[in-house]
Image (spheres, helix red, strand yellow):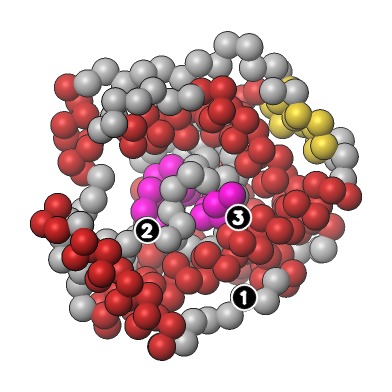
């Protein structure tokens, strides 16, 4: 299970690596979708990455997500329903990403398996959000602003207002963006309260960097050269913290599922 960000924020900023929890479908109903299937430990950006797939992918027709047979209520988590609309938003985004990743191999996406994975992610997400709410974690306007400022910083934007305006260009409302950011804060705070998340030491970061350099060397000339350590040190630290949060979220969600009432209809 990945814990990168809320759905609307993650859909727009695909390379984001700020802390949060599983794939949120968010509060909007306009197709803002989630992606718990990316992020999580990739190499620091040595190049644009992903742009080549977008440029040469236009010649190939992307397969379509198959939502036939998906029930109107995909799951019930402690009395709360996860609807087909929520599932579809998350599934379509993850299906597109999986299709792009598998184009190079010629393999087709196993949609039955992917549906199971997305349903499980949404269930875990709902459990964690319920846990945060039960813990009394409620975001203030200041908390939401700080979350959006962090997103702005991690994506090379100047301010929270710029994040909002960028997402508004994607058809989202400011209310939806702030609501997603509020849930982002709840989930991040809940995980930090429940788990022992620590900042990596310089020695750990240097070891992580050396491993990355070795991986790039083994890849030969197919990938760009890794930037100097000081240039990627902060990004490596963010990835280390995110990995700890991912692992903690997985464990906490499993415990909440065990003690809760969950029915999955897919």
Q: Is residue 15 magenta?
A: yes
In terms of secondary structure, where does tag 3 sit?
loop
- x, y percentage for residue 254? 75, 51
* Dots 3, 2 in contact, CB < 8 A: no
Residue in the picture at 21% in, 78% down: 228
In 3D space, how far apart are the residues under numbered discs 3 and 1 (Cα atoms)? Answer: 14 Å
The numbered mark at residue 42 is 2
Marks 1 and 2, the one that precedes in the sequence: 2
In 3D space, how far apart are the residues under numbered discs 1 and 2 (Cα atoms)? Answer: 20 Å
Residue topped by disc 1: 197
Residue topped by disc 3: 21
Q: Is residue 154 magenta?
A: no
User: Which residues lie in the magenta part?
Assistant: 1-16
- x, y percentage for residue 122? 65, 39
- Residue 217 image-quadrant placement: bottom left
**In screen coordinates, is 142 left or right of 40?**
right
Q: Of helix, strand and loop, which mostly describes the magenta segment? A: loop
- x, y percentage for residue 105? 29, 31
- x, y percentage for residue 143? 61, 67
Residue in the picture at 59% in, 49% down: 1
């Amino acid at each position: 299970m990945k814990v990168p960000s809320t759905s609307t924020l993650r859909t727009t900023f695909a390379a984001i690596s700020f802390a949060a929890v599983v794939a949120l479908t968010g509060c909007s109903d306009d197709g803002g979708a989630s992606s718990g299937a990316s992020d999580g430990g990739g190499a620091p950006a040595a190049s644009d990455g992903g742009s080549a797939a977008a440029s040469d992918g236009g010649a190939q027709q992307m397969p379509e997500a198959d939502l036939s047979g998906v029930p109107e209520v995909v799951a019930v988590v402690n009395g709360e329903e996860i609807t087909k609309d929520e599932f579809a938003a998350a599934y379509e985004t993850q299906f597109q990403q999986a299709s792009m990743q598998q184009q190079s191999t010629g393999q087709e996406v196993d949609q039955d398996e992917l549906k199971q994975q997305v349903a499980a992610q949404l269930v875990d997400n709902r459990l964690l959000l319920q846990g945060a709410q039960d813990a009394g974690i409620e975001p203030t306007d200041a908390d939401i602003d700080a979350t959006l400022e962090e997103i702005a910083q991690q994506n090379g934007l100047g301010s929270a207002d710029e994040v909002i305006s960028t997402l508004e260009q994607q058809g989202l409302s400011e209310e939806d963006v702030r609501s997603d950011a509020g849930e982002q804060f709840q989930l991040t705070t809940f995980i930090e309260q429940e788990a022992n998340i620590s900042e990596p030491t310089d020695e750990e970061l240097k070891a992580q960097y050396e491993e990355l350099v070795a991986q790039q060397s083994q890849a030969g000339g197919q990938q760009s050269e890794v930037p100097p350590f000081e240039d990627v040190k902060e990004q490596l630290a963010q990835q280390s913290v995110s990995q700890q949060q991912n692992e903690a979220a997985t464990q906490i969600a499993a415990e909440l599922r065990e003690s809760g009432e969950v029915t999955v209809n897919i």
